[in-house]
């Protein structure tokens, strides 16, 4: 005869505690809320492509409402947003963008075929959030080249920025090896950099949204 | 046998079976996307060209400069003691082990800070620690360290001190000679860490 048979209450209590512990374990089992949809290798390829880059002159079509499939998101802080932003943009910080509600919304936008265009002060500021959103599967996210600072300079003549190159970054501005030899360094040098001549940039063809038609 | 024991056993077997259907924890070594986003929005990963210049001049033993440009660009020019790890190589299987330096600080750099930032995001996802990005990259390196611009006459003393440091650094990195005359902050002190003898003294 087992001792517990004399005390069924005790057995009951042990059993309940046991089950509770197991349930707590299962509930707290850490499961990341977000998962990577693409591998690191694919991310490297993403970094090498300009597919997700949005050109400043393309903004024209958004601003004059020729295109209504793009949602503008300003990821800067509220203060900067308050001082000026691209018309029609929403202010959602990068961290807020991956909150539960916003993930749902992003999914809805993705299903609806809408593009989410994010921008910061410059391209690099929005590049990290852009890469992350792409990595968790939002391939409808694009990033504005030049960011707000470029837009702010060109906002009255966005179309003309088509022939401007200054928002292309990532290129060498100097012939480093030559400059670093130091032959030209002197104290009287006013430090004016000699820009490398004509960095060739490839650019998407400008396509008019309302081309053709009758 | 007590009925309770049978129930208890049943539960145990059920739970054990439940373990089988638990999802495989894949990507377990990669950083949680949520954590990665938090890291991305922190500006702490950026180090300035001045900080890096100082560390190189002082032979900081913990510094590893990582050039993420192509091998050809690296051949033509690189920073002192930098290693070349093109952005594409991050796709390799052994990228993580190749870039694991025990507790040393890796500073990624490229022409500016776009490629290095992209490399940083991927490296961070792979779980690498102690990685940083050279703010402004080589373009700013040239502008601030190799060809520093003299501050305006009305600039603060701090700016003049910074300029003096940059001139010294420029001389250090180019090996050229700079004639410094009128400037009141002419003396350039490039402080170098004393090499500590390991087994000094003793008996």
Image (spheres, coloured by chain):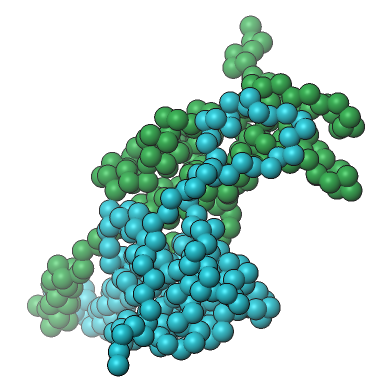
Chain colours: A cyan, B green
Q: Nearer the viewer, residue A205 or B140?
A: A205
Residue at 78%, 24% (x, y): give it.
Answer: B179
Q: Nearer the viewer, residue B198 or B168?
A: B168
Residue at 30%, 77% (x, y): give it.
Answer: A23
Most distant residue in the top direction: B203
Residue at 42%, 54% (x, y): give it.
Answer: A201
Most distant residue in the left direction: B1
Q: Tell me: residue B54, above or below residue A142.
A: above
Q: Position of residue A128 (x, y in %)?
A: 46, 62
Q: Position of residue A197 (x, y in %)?
A: 52, 44
Residue at 54%, 58% (x, y): give it.
Answer: A166
Most distant residue in the bottom direction: A214
Q: Is residue B16 visible?
A: no
Where is the C terminus of chain B found, in terms of image quarters?
Answer: top right
The reply, left or right, for residue A196 in relation to residue B173 is left
Q: Is residue B45 visible?
A: yes
Q: Position of residue A75 (x, y in %)?
A: 53, 73
Q: Tell me: residue B117, above or below residue A83.
A: above
Say how many tags the image has: 0
The reply, left or right, for residue A19 in relation to residue A197 is left
Q: Tell me: residue B179, above or below residue A130.
A: above
Residue B61, located in which quarter of the rendered image? top right
Residue B59, located in which quarter of the rendered image? top right
Q: Position of residue A94 (x, y in %)?
A: 50, 71
Where is the N terminus of chain B found, in terms of image quarters?
Answer: bottom left
């Amino acid at each position: 005869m087992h001792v517990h048979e004399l005390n069924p209450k005790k057995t009951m209590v042990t059993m309940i505690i046991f089950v509770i512990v197991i349930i707590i374990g299962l509930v707290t089992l850490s499961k990341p809320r977000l998962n990577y949809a693409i591998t690191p290798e694919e991310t490297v390829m993403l970094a090498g492509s300009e597919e997700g880059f949005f050109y400043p002159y393309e903004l024209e079509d958004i601003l004059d409402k020729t295109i209504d499939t793009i949602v503008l998101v300003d990821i800067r802080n509220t203060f900067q947003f308050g001082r000026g932003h691209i018309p029609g943009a929403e202010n959602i910080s990068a961290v807020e963008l991956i909150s539960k509600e916003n993930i749902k919304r992003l999914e809805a936008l993705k299903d609806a075929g809408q593009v989410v265009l994010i921008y910061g002060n410059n391209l690099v500021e929005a590049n990290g959030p852009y890469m992350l959103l792409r990595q968790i599967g939002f391939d409808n996210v694009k990033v504005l080249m030049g960011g707000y600072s470029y837009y702010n300079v060109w906002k009255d003549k966005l179309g003309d920025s088509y022939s401007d190159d200054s928002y292309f970054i990532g290129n060498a501005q100097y012939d480093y090896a030559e400059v670093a030899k130091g032959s030209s360094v002197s104290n009287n040098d006013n430090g004016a950099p000699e820009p490398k001549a004509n960095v060739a940039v490839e650019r998407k063809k400008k396509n008019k949204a309302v081309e053709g038609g009758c | 046998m007590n009925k309770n024991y049978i129930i208890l056993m049943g539960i145990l077997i059920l739970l054990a079976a439940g373990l089988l259907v638990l999802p495989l924890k894949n990507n377990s070594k990669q950083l949680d996307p949520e954590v990665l986003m938090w890291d991305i929005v922190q500006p702490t990963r950026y180090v300035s060209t001045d900080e890096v210049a100082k560390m190189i001049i002082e032979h900081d033993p913990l510094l590893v400069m990582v050039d993420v440009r192509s091998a050809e660009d690296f051949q033509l020019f690189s920073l002192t003691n930098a290693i070349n790890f093109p952005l594409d190589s991050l796709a390799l299987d052994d990228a993580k082990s190749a870039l694991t330096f025990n507790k040393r600080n890796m500073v990624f750099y490229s022409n500016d800070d776009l490629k290095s930032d992209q490399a940083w995001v991927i490296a961070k996802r792979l779980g690498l620690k102690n990685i940083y990005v050279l703010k402004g990259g080589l373009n700013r390196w040239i502008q601030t360290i190799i060809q520093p611009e003299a501050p305006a006459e009305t600039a603060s003393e701090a700016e003049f001190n910074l300029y003096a440091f940059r001139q010294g650094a420029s001389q250090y990195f180019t090996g050229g000679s700079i004639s410094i005359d009128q400037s009141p902050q002419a003396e350039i002190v490039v402080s170098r860490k004393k090499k500590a003898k390991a087994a000094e003294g003793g008996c």
